[in-house]
Amino acid sequence: MELWKGTLDSLVLKTLSGGPMHGYSVTRWIREQSGGTLEVEDAALYQSLHRMERRGWVESQWGRSENNRRAKYYRITVRGRRELRRQTGEIRRYVGALFQVLETEIA
Amino acid sequence: MSERGFRGVGRIVRFRRPLREHVARDVDDEIRFHLERRAEELVAAGSSESEAHDRARAEFGDPGRASQTLRRESGRTERRFRLAEHVGNFRRDLRHAARSLAKTPGLAWMIVGTVGLGIGATTAMFSVVHAVLLRPLPYPEADRIYRIYTDSPPYEWPFSVADYQALEEQQTRFETVAGYANVTMTLNRDEVAERLTGKTVTWSYFPLLGVSTVLGRGFTEADADPGAEPTVVVSDRLWNRFLDGDPQVIGEAVRLDGRIYTVIGVLPRNVGPLEADREFFVAAQWGPPPRRGPFFIRALGRLEPGTDPATAQEELQIINRRIFPLWEESYQNQDASWGMMDLKRQVLGDVGSTLVIVLGAVAFVLVIASVNAANLLLARVANRGRELAVRAALGASRKRLLQHLWAESTILAVCGAMLGLLVAVLGIWLIERFGADYIPRAQEIALGGPVVWFLLAITLGSALLFGLVPSVRGGRARLEQTLRSGGRTTTDAVTSRRLRRALVVAQFAIAAPLLVGAGLLLGSLARLQRVDPGFDSRNLLTAGVSLPAAAYPETTDILSFLDEAQSRIEALPGVSAVGFANGRPPDHYPMENNFDLVDRPVPAGSTEPSVPWISATPAFFGALEVPLLEGRTFDETDVAGDAAPVLIVDHTWAQRFFPGESALGRGVRQGGCPTCTPFTIVGVVGSARYTGLDDPGGGTAYWPYWPLLGTDRQGYFFMRTSVDPLSILPSMRAVVREMDPSVPVENAATMRELLRASLDTPRYLTVLLSGFAFIALLLSIIGIYGVMSHFVQRHTRDIAIRIAVGGRPARVSRTVVGRGMRLAGLGVLLGIGASFVLTRFLSALLFEVGSTDPRTFAAVPALMVGVAILACLVPAQRAAAVDPARILRED
């Protein structure tokens, strides 16, 4: 299932809210948590990461991966957490409203 | 993941992010890492190596395109980080610099104060120069406006009606010509009578200048018809003050000099320099003239666009030659021609050079203040050698060290600029308030855009000077050596010391011309104050009156008013003598008249001499105590209707035209009128000055209030008193009011005040320049004192050794003073040399003092060297007092 427009950032932020990760584990984590339902295009994910870095929602640092290779780690910032809360609330309201309309009995 | 786990990762991942050099490489590495990890995973799940790679790439999307996008995004992030880094560094530097400056508040205040004052004063003066000299006059296309006059070097005479009408009819090079004459009239309203300054203008005057009224209309050709109903255009000020700012004022009548004028227009609040001090404008109604004179019209012309001024000038001369034969009866001066001059040059007069001199002087003060700041900061860097060395040892790059030093300069410069802005605002306010009488266009001075840019530019220049010089030392010092030598400055500070010495030399070199200039002006002012005005100026009150033409149509009316007023005022207690004249020393005379001697006529067609011409009552000379040297003063017979015309001249006049002979009984024809009855000289009196204390003048002629002379209704009472002259004024006013309430008493002042006021301009200039020179000298002293103190401090050990091996303390202090003198001496020498060139610009402002006055040029170096010695004596004493036992035991 493809992601709805504008929801990728919130997924990535949520993923990083657990702790620093490199891009690859972010994709894997999202795939695992959604039980494979959500498909994230890798290129889009990296674009999201870089865009959010510019906006100061995440920050990055080169480090060593589990098998000791050079990897770029991302960490959510305080502003990123605030953004995550905002986006989560927004999505919740959006989906709620959507359901309200979709499940209305039409006489 | 918990916060703890977070910290665990933090060990591998330090999130204090260093700046990245290779954005592109990083992006590619990141993508490659992802692809490899995905491929590994797929291989682990059973795919073949190549299959896995292909699938990883396919899942990723388009890695090539992604890389492009990511590089762009990453690059932007990087730039932001770099900027943040710089800002962060700079803020840290600023905080640190502020703290370290706060440790030496005296130094910081000294630099901010002197530099700020310099910036402010220079900016204020620049705003004046910009508004007055650089900007065009506030008329549309003002560069096409010229003043046209009769050129008879050294004089530039106004035009007459005949001249103006000929110009108007015959010229072809000007789009428009206009003429005006400044007039004063009495405005009467209810019981109030007030003298107002205004202009009589041709109807083309406002269109030529491009001035339009905010209410009503300007003049039309019909207003200029002789016999048309009199009309007046009023200034915004007069409209508000006298006509209550009433928008319905157009068409109302006002009474000027007893005549009814209809108000037809109101000028805008902001007007050009020709209108600035004028309250009303009335239309000139000039009929055909009976003769060439009198000459009272100031003519203006607006050149046709694209016309060469030289061709217009040529045409003016041709017209003058053409009309010459028409008026040969009444005007014979063939030497005189017509000329024209840029209106701006004419408005400015000679004030431009004074302004530029003052601007130059304040700029010198700013430079010297900046040099002083550089010197102080350099000493500070030298003293902080150890601190800087430690910072360098801890890994601060040379660039960062310089940035740190620059932060201090930035703080000082910004504070200096803020103080400067304050000083500039205050200065501009002062100049507008008190300078308007001396500076034309003063009302146009403002702190506008170019002035603010100027302030920023000179702040930057000053900051570069006092910021760069110390950083030469701060950056170049061999820091590790400093560190090793325990922070005591060693040979590595040679550059710094050379620089400091050079700065002291520069300070003295810059201060010298300022002191010389101030000295010359002071000498000149002292001489001006000693000038004998030609009469006794103590206990002398003067007050002006003007008699309305309507009430005093004939000279006999004027004379009877004056007679009665004189005797009534003389009867007041405390008054011993009263006279009346239409001119007032030291700098006001009503007109300058040309004349010819009956015995020695000027050759036909040449320019006649001219001198100030004054109408005086017989009692005038006695009241002023102008001594009678020969003959007699006026008496009642001179003012009788059929009296023979008589003249009194002053000593200067007599010496000029009849050197070594008596001027008594000589005949004089006045006003270029060869057919008029000549005047006979009946007396020679002492020379009083009417053209300013600084001008010995070419003599003065007096004539009596004489019925045939026509009607000059304006003049001054001169009251010799035995008490404080100002105490007489109220009763004198009462006398005049009692006689005629419509006659205003104005411009009352004691002669002492007038003499003093006439020297205001040179006095202000002298005070200003002396103040600047004093500040410059003070800063130079601070400079040399600082350098010599440092010298002694640095050589304490050497001095101790010298004293220990038997050197006499007196010799030690002589050495110190001698060293200081070499610097001061070199600076003074350079500065005095420069002064010989620079003071030439002052020569027009000097009175009886040469621009290379030997006394000033000897006194200034002596003064400078003297104070420099005093400044060096303190460190010299300290050197002599060195206790070798204590110093040498210290190490």
Image: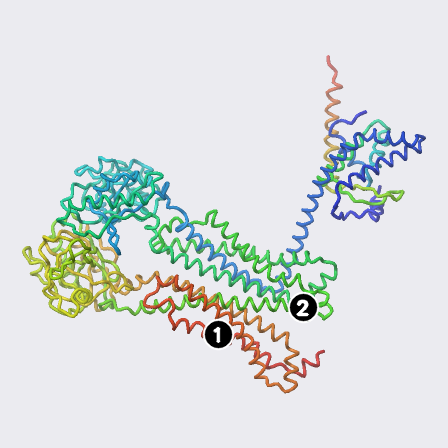
Q: Is residue B115 above or below residue B131?
A: below
Q: Where residue B142 sits in the image (x, y, percent)?
A: 36, 43
- The part of the image, by quadrant, that contains residue B282 is top left
User: Mark 2: which amino acid?
Assistant: Asp
> Which numbered mark, 2 or 1, is in the foreground of this view?
2
Q: Is residue B831 left or right of residue B644?
A: right
User: Mark 1: which amino acid?
Assistant: Val
Q: Is residue B96 above or below residue B312?
A: below
Residue holding disc 1: B865
Secondary structure of residue under mark 2 = helix
Residue holding disc 2: B492
Residue at image coords 39%, 53%? B432
- In this rendered view, identify the residue nearer to me: B817 or B267: B817
Q: Where residue B23 sits in the image (x, y, percent)?
A: 75, 42
In the image, farthest residue toward the bottom: B806
Q: Is residue B673 left or right of residue A105?
A: left
Secondary structure of residue under mark 1 = helix
Can you tell which mark lies on residue B765?
none
Quarter of the image containing the N terminus of chain B? top right
Q: Is residue B192 visible?
A: no
- In this rendered view, identify the residue nearer to me: B2 or B552: B552
The answer to which of marks 2 and 1 sits earlier in the sequence is 2
Number of marks: 2
Label 2 is found on which chain of the structure? B
